Amino acid sequence: MSTPAFVVEILKLARSGPVTRPEIRREMGIAEDTAYEWVAELVAGGLLVERPNDRTRGGRGKVAQAYSLSPEWGGKP
């Protein structure tokens, strides 16, 4: 059984450091709902973990949740 392409692409993005769903959406050219579902699947499966997002947002509103590779998969603890 092969790994779905979306998993590979999201893990590549997360390998370089915390990434947000809006960043994943932009990089992959996918819909917001799709990014939400895929990230939720990877968090539930233990591949991604939530991280504090220390980056400030230029506009108004809430700062997006950041995700990174789980330490079990090579991410930083």
Image (tube, rainbow, N blue to C red):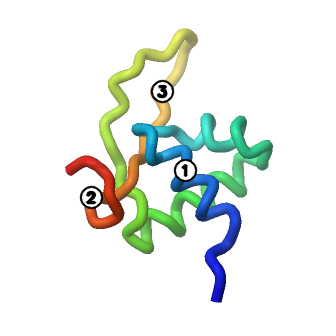
Task: Indicate the secondary structure of the residue bearing disc 3.
Answer: loop
Picture coordinates of residue 61, whole percent (x, y): 52, 21
Residue that badge 3 annotates: 62
- Name the residue tied to disc 1: 12
Label 1 packing within 10 angstroms: few (<14), some (14-19), many (20+): few
The answer to which of 41 and 61 lies nearer the viewer is 41
Report which quarter residue 60 is drawn in.
top right
Q: Residue at x 31, y 36 (%)?
A: 52
Residues under numbered marks 2 and 3 in contact, where contact means CB atoms less than 8 Å apart: no
Q: Position of residue 43 (x, y in %)?
A: 43, 63
Q: Residue 71 bears which disc, if any?
A: 2
Quadrant housing the N terminus: bottom right
3 vs 1, front mark: 1
User: Which numbered disc, 2 or 3, marks the residue that appears first in the sequence?
Assistant: 3
Q: Position of residue 50 (x, y in %)?
A: 36, 49
Labels 2, 3: front one: 2
Amino acid on which the number 1 mark rests in the picture? Lys
For this view, does 70 lie left or right of residue 59?
left
Marks 3 and 1, how far apart at CA: 25 Å
Label 3: how many residues lie within 10 Å, few (<14), some (14-19) or many (20+)?
few
What's the residue type where badge 2 is placed? Pro
| As drawn, 63 above or below 43 | above
Mark 2 to mark 1 CA distance (whole Å): 15 Å
Q: Position of residue 24 (x, y in %)?
A: 62, 43
